[in-house]
Image: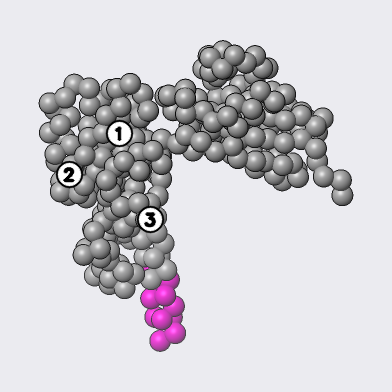
């Protein structure tokens, strides 16, 4: 089988400071036949600042699947495509997965041109544990769904990293404080690598106080880092969840019992509901055998 000739370079671009663009990233952009960009206007400004002029094609959440065939055809012709997002590393809460997945399935080469990442930048200066962490992207925008997700994450032992819109940061801190307790440590990093970069560190309660005092707290691009649940508070195990379901199942409908146990334990409601159904099926089978 003859190897496909085309290649995709996944190029990390600055999250604010243009000097953070690596020489290799510039060379990749300069050598690409076309640049697939989340916002062609934004990337056009970047190219202008670099003294480059390249063909651009938009690739965003609303058109990515429609673009895949067109870009695969370019790869078939042997072209190199540079994939960029508006800032940072592509595919991290940004479009690109559908294209990369299709290109790999078709046998094309995909290589990383690593560089800036708001996730790692915030994590490195938050002052919280970095040995194990997970990235959660944006929390749900609707209040009820956001509260529910915060409850589900309350027992996560790893450090958590989120992106958040400035107009929702206070509501998110409030939801996290309600779910995790006001003394859970966190850091709010805004405008990373830019002229007004600021990092607020403290407990969730202290951060809410800072937000009330500082009008700049809720401005600019924000990355939130949250301490995981301290090891001294172990999350309820499966045996505890099953016992809680047993106690509640006779008093409440299955779905309601699962919702209550999920809220108490921080488990996903869907997972607890599946356990409740399995328990019910097992109990029915035992009765039928008697």
Q: Which of 281 and 228 is in front in this view?
A: 228
Q: Mark 1 points at which residue?
A: 189
| Residue occupying the point 30% across, 34% down | 189
Q: Which of 71 and 248 is in front in this view?
A: 71
| Residue occupying the point 31% across, 41% down | 125
- Looking at marks 1 and 3 on the same chain, the residue that comes earlier in the sequence is marked by 3
Report which quarter residue 263 is drawn in: bottom left
Going by the image, does 85 lie left or right of 231? right
Q: Is residue 199 inside the magenta stretch? A: no
Instruction: Tell me if label 1 and label 2 are in contact, CB under 8 Å.
Output: no
Q: What element carries label 2?
A: strand
Q: How crowded is mark 1: few (under 14 residues within 10 Å), some or many (20 or more)?
A: many
Q: For the residues marked 1 and 2, what is the alpha-carbon distance in whole angstroms?
A: 14 Å
Q: Name the residue under label 2.
A: 203
Q: For the residues marked 1 and 3, what is the alpha-carbon distance in whole angstroms?
A: 19 Å
Which residues make up the magenta segment?
280-290
Q: Name the residue under label 3.
A: 132
Q: How crowded is mark 3: few (under 14 residues within 10 Å), some or many (20 or more)?
A: few
203 shown above or below 199? below
| Residue occupying the point 29% across, 42% down | 126
Report which quarter residue 217 is drawn in: top left
């Amino acid at each position: 089988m003859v190897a496909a000739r085309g290649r995709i370079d996944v190029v990390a671009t600055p999250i604010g400071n243009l000097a953070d663009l690596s020489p290799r990233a510039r060379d990749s952009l300069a050598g690409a036949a076309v640049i697939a960009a989340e916002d062609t206007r934004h990337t056009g400004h970047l190219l202008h600042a670099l003294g480059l002029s390249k063909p651009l094609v938009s690739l965003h959440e609303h058109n990515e699947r429609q673009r895949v065939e067109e870009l695969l055809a370019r790869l078939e012709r042997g072209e190199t495509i540079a994939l960029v997002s508006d800032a940072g590393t592509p595919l991290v809460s940004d479009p690109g997965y559908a294209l990369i997945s299709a290109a790999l399935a078709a046998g094309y080469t995909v290589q990383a041109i690593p560089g800036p990442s708001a996730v790692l930048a915030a994590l490195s200066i938050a002052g919280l544990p970095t040995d194990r962490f997970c990235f959660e992207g944006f929390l749900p925008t609707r209040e009820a769904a956001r509260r529910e997700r915060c409850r589900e994450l309350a027992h996560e032992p790893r450090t958590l990293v989120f992106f958040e819109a400035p107009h929702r940061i206070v509501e998110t801190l409030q939801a996290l404080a309600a779910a995790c307790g006001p003394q859970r440590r966190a850091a709010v990093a805004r405008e990373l690598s830019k002229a007004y970069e600021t990092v607020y560190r403290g407990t969730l309660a202290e951060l809410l106080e800072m937000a009330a005092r500082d009008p700049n707290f809720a401005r600019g691009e924000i990355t939130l880092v949250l301490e995981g649940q301290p090891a001294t508070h172990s999350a309820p195990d499966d045996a505890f969840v099953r016992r809680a379901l047993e106690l509640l199942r006779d008093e409440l409908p299955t779905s309601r019992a699962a919702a209550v146990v999920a809220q108490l334990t921080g488990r996903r409601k869907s997972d607890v509901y599946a356990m409740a159904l399995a328990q019910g099926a097992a109990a029915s089978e035992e009765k039928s055998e008697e």
